[in-house]
């Protein structure tokens, strides 16, 4: 079993065009995940000189390449809860931003001819208890009544059982606009597309410090030298950075939560088709939930919040055993199926579980996607490129308050308590 991401392990190394670190560019982007690469593509198309600075050895080394492979529409929190807090019009706009985000991924895949097994077969949110199904039914009724999403549909237990070969589920809520793809292939295709437009991508280039030198001009300091830029986009999970300098303000507003994934050996076409006949993305609605899907080579990708811990080889292996048990409980017919890959990654969670994007101290940022990032990060790369070109209205998350997480000054010491709380909620629900 390999303790590394299947998405990144199953693609050949990406050969980026070699460049010396430029001394000056129009735009410097910190992070070569989906946000940074999408922004680089859009900005380079506008004629800007762009340098993407990535600390890792490859593109998409963190969340963009370490997720479950879902490209889902729908909010990370219940639409009705959001509508009660901010009003129907704003909640509807944010919900539709996720629809637009899936459309953005779809368009880029087609326009750039990225071979990444993109499928738009929908998402099925699954209920394991009768009252969970009632909650999903209320969600569907509200989405339809408010004219937010008239394509959603409640499936009863029999219809779910017809496409998901498991007896665990009471029914589900089908979102037809969701999709899936191979994250490693998409990341490489997006990087090459940005490079074709003239953007430079520098891996192994960690930004240690950013200083404002004059007006809106910033200097980014790395071990390879300094880059001066007229504009800077922070497109990286701030939770990976220490200190209270450039990234401290952002770090206090994001909590890194581990999410862990296992991928089985190839099951074969017939066995995989019998297991998940519609080949959608699937997610349960428990607080400690599972999510799963099939790959193009007929593997089962099965993930979840196995443990409230930060990813490391030891934590990944321990979490893998927990996920193996969850997989066996969900699909006992697979027996002791071989696990070929097991890995973890960080979900940059915000208090309200919604993204935050804007400008602070002359630095642009977009992050905090809270487990719904594959589509929104790509979309927000494009949107922030438009914002940086002068269209402030392009940012769907503009003008939002972003208070710090109380008590969060460093490593998230409170995660074990959070995990215990959610497990207790699931047990008593």
Image: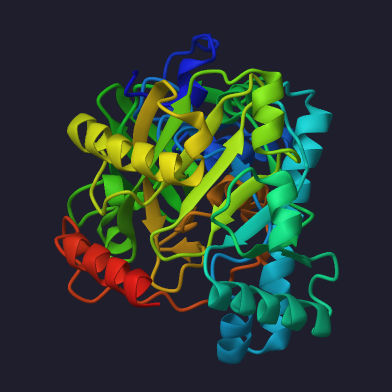
Residue 379: in sight, yes or no?
yes
Query: What residue appears at the point 49 percent right and 63 percent down from the top-left corner?
Result: 359
Q: Is residue 176 left or right of residue 13?
A: right
How far across and down, in percent of the image, does residue 376 sit? 61, 52
Residue 43 located left or right of residue 1? right
Quadrant where the N terminus lies?
A: top left
> 294 or 179: nearer the eye?
294
Q: Is residue 231 visible?
A: no
- x then y, percent, for residue 145: 82, 85
Query: 113 or 300, which lies in front?
Result: 300
The quarter of the rendered structure image containing the C terminus is bottom left
Would you say 277 lies left or right of 320 here? right
Residue displayed at 23% across by 49% down: 309
| Labels in figure, total | 0
Give the quarter of the image for residue 95: bottom right
Give the answer, above or below, for where 147 lies relative to 391.
Answer: below
Residue at image point 44% right, 24% down:
337
Position of 407 relative to 365 (above/below): below
Q: Nearer the viewer, residue 185 or 142?
A: 142
When asked about the image quadrant of residue 261, the answer is top left
Asked if 78 appears above or below 241 in the picture, the reply is below
At which x and y percent is residue 192?
Answer: 64, 20
């Amino acid at each position: 079993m390999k303790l590394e991401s299947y998405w990144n392990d199953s693609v050949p190394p990406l050969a980026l065009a070699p460049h010396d670190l430029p001394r000056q560019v129009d735009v410097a982007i910190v992070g070569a995940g989906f946000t940074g690469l999408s922004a680089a593509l859009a900005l380079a198309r506008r004629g800007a000189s762009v340098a993407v600075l990535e600390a890792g050895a490859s593109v998409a080394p963190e969340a963009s390449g370490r997720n479950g492979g879902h490209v889902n529409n729908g909010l990370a929190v219940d639409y009705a809860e959001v509508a009660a807090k901010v009003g129907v019009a704003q909640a509807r706009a944010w919900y539709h931003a996720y629809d637009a985000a899936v459309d953005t991924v779809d368009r880029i895949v087609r326009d750039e001819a990225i071979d990444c097994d993109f499928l738009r077969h929908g998402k099925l949110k699954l209920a394991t208890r009768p009252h969970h199904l009632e909650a999903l039914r209320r969600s569907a009724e509200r989405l339809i009544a408010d004219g937010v999403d008239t394509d959603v549909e409640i499936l009863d237990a029999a219809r779910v059982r017809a496409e998901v070969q498991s007896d665990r589920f009471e029914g589900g809520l089908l979102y037809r606009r969701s999709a899936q793809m191979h994250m490693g292939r998409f990341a490489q295709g997006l990087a090459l597309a940005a490079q074709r437009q003239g953007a430079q991508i520098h891996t192994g280039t960690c930004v240690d410090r950013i200083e404002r030198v004059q007006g809106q001009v910033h200097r980014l300091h790395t071990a390879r030298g300094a880059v001066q830029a007229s504009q800077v986009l922070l497109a990286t999970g701030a939770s990976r950075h220490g200190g209270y300098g450039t990234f401290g303000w952002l770090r206090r507003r994001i909590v890194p939560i581990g999410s862990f994934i296992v991928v089985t050996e190839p099951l074969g076409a017939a066995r995989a088709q019998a297991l998940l006949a519609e080949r959608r993305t699937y997610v349960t609605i428990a607080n400690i939930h599972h999510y799963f899907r099939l790959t193009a080579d007929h593997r089962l990708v099965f993930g979840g919040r196995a443990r409230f811990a930060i990813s490391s080889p030891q934590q990944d292996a321990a979490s893998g055993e927990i996920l193996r048990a969850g997989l066996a409980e969900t699909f006992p017919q697979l027996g002791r199926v071989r696990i070929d890959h097991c890995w973890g990654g960080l979900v940059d969670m915000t208090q309200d579980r919604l993204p935050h994007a804007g400008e602070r101290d002359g630095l642009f940022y977009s992050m905090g996607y809270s487990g719904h990032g594959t589509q929104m990060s790509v979309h927000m790369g494009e949107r922030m490129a438009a914002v940086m070109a002068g269209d402030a209205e392009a940012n769907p998350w503009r003008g939002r308050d972003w208070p710090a997480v109380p008590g969060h000054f460093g490593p998230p010491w409170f995660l074990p308590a959070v995990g215990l709380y959610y497990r207790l909620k699931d047990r008593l629900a």
